[in-house]
Image (cartoon, helix red, strand yellow):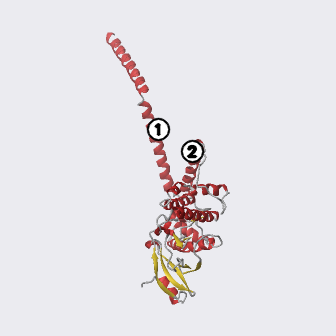
Amino acid sequence: MRLPDALNALISDGIIKEVIRPLQSGKEAQVFIIRYDQELCVAKVYKKSNDRSFKNRASYTEGRRVKSTRQQRAMSKKSNYGKEALEQEWYQSEYQMLKRLSHTDLLIPTCHAFIDNVLIMEFIQDEQGQPAPRLADLSLSAEEAERLLLLLIRQVVIMLCEGVVHGDLSDFNILMAGNRPVIIDFPQAIDTAHNRNSRRFLIRDVRNLTHFMGRFAPHLKRRKYGEEMWALYEAGTLRPDTVLTGKYNPKAKRVDEDSLIREIQSAAKEAAEKREQHMSKYAKKAQRAREVAEAIAKEQKEKRETSDHPKNNGKRRKSNRRKNRRYHKNKKGNTKS
């Protein structure tokens, strides 16, 4: 059995006693069943960025911060050092999120350690002691589907009350330990205070759940728990024990178009000023020349449109006829004399 270098290093140091077998290989990590501190656990070994197939990572990592300002600047500029720091931040994010949520009533695995980019955590098993199956692999009755959906929606509400959205929640990221669901895979989890995509990801997570359960109980597909809980969260009235109805009727808001246009123009002006601050003198001169050329072209276009207007064409033809009559009249007078 070929093992990742990070796992071999932990075996050599005596931290991991034994690797039993591989459990799963996903889009972002490989998971192994191991023996750690005299008990069965799982070791999650994260893949490097060029081996991962997780898409649109920037949408999930928006707003994440680290303590070191130097490291944060490097991450923003995406220098070589910054890219390494981004990798380390991605590796650590799941461990930090599980630790953050460990004091709640969430049904999530217990973390034991995070060493050299290897996350060691609880081994979720079924009633026979075998690896717990994914929710996606099970068939449910309509009653079981509704019971499970309400339980999972409660888990999503608890997370949201902690300011967290899972971001990739679906029937593939939920293990069934008997009748108890356990939510896994948190590296892409979102902090709602710093990520503008939080509402979109929350609604998508909840729709994944309602659509899966809707296979067994079609009426569940129509429920809008995601939109309802986000509205309550924004209003500051969402609590872990809040009872949701699955109904959502947003009040129509009248949009002040003039105000919206002013805000857009103001934002565009600010962005242009910021860009100009970082431009060289030559670039500024070229930018001004382009603006002057655009203004001249616009003015000439307006003149052409004005002159081509039917009303103006009629005036121009009348004026030309008057000039012709005067010319011929003067010509006749000159001939007689």
Which disc, if any, is residue 299?
1
The answer to whether 328 is drawn above or below residue 58 in the figure is: above
Looking at the picture, which amino acid does disc 2 mark?
Answer: Ile
Q: Nearer the viewer, mark 1 or mark 2?
A: 2
Label 2, on which residue? 261
- Horizontal and vertical percent for residue 232? 64, 56
Task: Decide which of 246, 272 is in the foreground and name it.
Answer: 246
- Horizontal and vertical percent for residue 87? 51, 73
- Horizontal and vertical percent for residue 48? 47, 75
Q: Is residue 237 left or right of residue 86?
A: right
Quarter of the image for residue 51 reads bottom left
- Horizontal and vertical percent for residue 123? 54, 79
Looking at the picture, which amino acid does disc 1 mark?
Answer: Glu
Quarter of the image for residue 74 reads bottom right
Going from N to C along the chain, the mark reached first, 1 or 2, is 2
Which disc, if any, is residue 86?
none
Task: Decide which of 77, 65 is in the foreground and name it.
Answer: 65
Q: Give the farthest residue toward the top.
A: 336
Task: Decide which of 51, 149 is in the foreground and name it.
Answer: 149
Quarter of the image for residue 239 reads bottom right
